[in-house]
Image (tube, grey):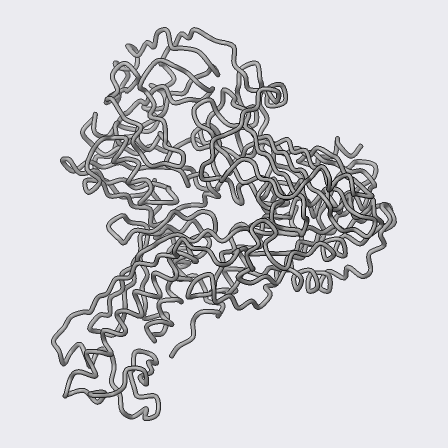
Amino acid sequence: MSEAVGKPFNRVDGRLKVTGRAHYPSEIPTENIAHAVLIQSTIAKGRIQTIDTSVVERSPGVLGILTHLNAPRLTTRGEGFPPQVPLLQDDVVQYNGQHIGVVIAESLEQAAYAASLVKVDYAVEQAATDFKRELSHAIAPEPGPGGSPDSMRGDVAQGLTMAAVQIDQTYTTPNEHHNPLGLTAVTAVWEGERLILYDTTQGVHSMRRTLAGTLGIPIENIQVIARFVGGAFGATLLPQPHVTLAAVAARQVGQPVKLVLTREQMYTSHGYRPQTSQHLVLGATAEGRLTGIVHEALADTSQLQDRNERITSATQMLYQCPNVTTIRRLVRLDKGTPTPMRAPGEATGIFALECAMDELAYALQLDPIELRLRNYADADPENGLPWSSKALRECYELGAQRFGWQRRTPEPGSMRDGRYLIGWGMASSTYPYLGNAASARAKIWLDGSALVQSGATDIGPGTYTAMTQIAADALGLAAERVRFELGDTNLPDAPSQGGSRIVISVGPAVQGAAIAVRNQMIQRAIADQASPLYGANPQEIAIENGYLFVAQDRARGETYTDILARQELPEVEATFDFNPGEEEQFSKHAFGAQFAEVRVDPDLGEVRVTRFVGVYAAGRIINPKTARSQMIGGIVGGIGMALMEETRMDHRYGRYTNANIAEYLVPTHADIPDIDVTFVDEDDPHVNPLGAKGIGEVCLVGVAPAIANAIYHATGKRIRELPITPDKLL
């Protein structure tokens, strides 16, 4: 049998992308296409008193305009996470940038010009948008997808009393925005009562369910397609209202409509990473054993919906400590609702925890790795379950070796290169296993090739390629003989691509469907008197490059094509539903260790990351080549989180002031050093049949604290507020 899984395959969709033949949602060839442009509020809170569209209606090329005065009634029965709130249903404005209308015209230029002619008068109300000012109004969220907001084990007060050393600090992180290179776009086409939607969504089936509920039409009347998505990082994980508006606009004007968000509109149209204020208390014995942890996290959300992220979840399980209390609270502001952004919750929570652990290491005069090893958890301390697998210790050891950690001198400011200060820092990384149910379909064609399908999406990590490899191995075919299709609700149901869940959910479904259709072919052969395999034991049949044979007698065999041709079948098909089950006997997490070297200019406060090493234990790695690329991308995002990324707001108007990628800074090639990525071999038979854990998030978690800890080592200045910009070091 071929062995594609575990090999560094090139992307099967790479040629389509580099030659421009991969069509994204804004590039779908559609006849008679109209263009939609959003009208957005310019106040943060209040009501629309009047909205004058008379000039717009007479503007050249305008086909229609929708506002709350003429929009159809929509419902909140969608299944978003949280359910999306339909817009244009009343005159209430709840945040600056809220969609209050949409203009449809023959050309994009005509629609944009007409939208600029709309005149709106508001009754303005006092808005609350300043997170720091509203901290005293924090509320406890209801338990939801983010879990219970509070947890407690042991007696934390007693544990802290026993501590010889305590760290008691507050750490803050800002709002961040996703900024994928591709602008969010949707093309809506109605064919009678049937809606076809091409969207940059991370979940076609999730979007379909939401649209069916919001529009109040049968789900079978909707097809959502997203074969290629130009990046997302969580921006389009949850269904967003502008997609519904495009569908409604297309129905109103009676022709296909394309809506492409501008870069500025992307800052108010599909969420952001919540900002946080986190109070951490660590207590430890003089030997460095943790005796108590308190982690209280406050995050912002909107007045519309509570978005409760798992900010404190890693604190509950990463280190062995008998007494731990974690608390999560939300601050409701007059802003749009946050949405998941790569490693939601864990990335911000680990920043606080791992910086506090570094502070504790210095207070105890312990090596930061040694402190973590002294508090290493051999089972999940929160629930007592054994780990399905855990090679974090190996990550520390291999990472330290590859980084050269033994050459580190512990005193802050002790390492220099000429006039520059050199700092070394490290942090732990973890992300939970979030497997979901998924389905797949596999077909073997008469020519011996195969088609495998599932309604997943691919936002860039290489889903097309990984699924091709998994299917090829299960079918006993060369990967070049397998085609994988995704991104269409006409294909079997699959979860959205987020939370590192596609390979661990869709992968087993693809494997199961491929095995099922392979077994069908074996059964057809051994039951056919004309087959060389007639009467053979199915357990003894091997497959290599589409040739089925008795393992002990290779000459006794035939191909998939031989079987189908003799039985006059054009194809054989099978489906498989993967369900991970609900009973948990193990605690399942991916782990990693992050190591950073920084160079700091003592006069200018400029920080450069000059080396980075990441070592990860994430079960079986399907494609080391695309996996390494995925990890590098996460580390680059973590460097941005540590040093650059911050969305700023003018609280007088509730308006973002850097809603563009000129003033919202992200790393460029010049900011990124060579990045050393290594995977620890990890066999995990408990997570799924593939033994894979998912890698999309664990690579970003821990990057920011590793850099912050390195900056402290270089300068002796502990910066607890992200991003760490030069002004904070001077």
Q: Which residue is pictured at 77% across the width and 59% down the height? A: 405
Q: Which residue is pictured at 85% across the width and 50% down the height? A: 365
Compared across the picture, whether 459 is left or right of 86 comes to right
Residue 409 image offset from top left, x and y in percent: 85, 54
* Residue 654 visible in the displayed image: yes
Vertical position of residue 124 compared to residue 442: above or below = above
Residue 125 image offset from top left, x and y in percent: 48, 9
Front-lying residue, 195 or 663: 195
Look at the image and tell me in which quarter the C terminus lies: top right
Residue 194 is drawn in which quadrant?
top left
Residue 367 image offset from top left, x and y in percent: 80, 54
Residue 705 image offset from top left, x and y in percent: 68, 44
* Residue 418 visible in the displayed image: no
Residue 217 is drawn in which quadrant?
top left
Vertical position of residue 291 compared to residue 15: above or below = above
Front-lying residue, 605 or 426: 426
- Marks counted in the figure total 0
Look at the image and tell me in which quarter the N terminus lies: bottom left
Compared across the picture, whether 147 is left or right of 133 comes to left
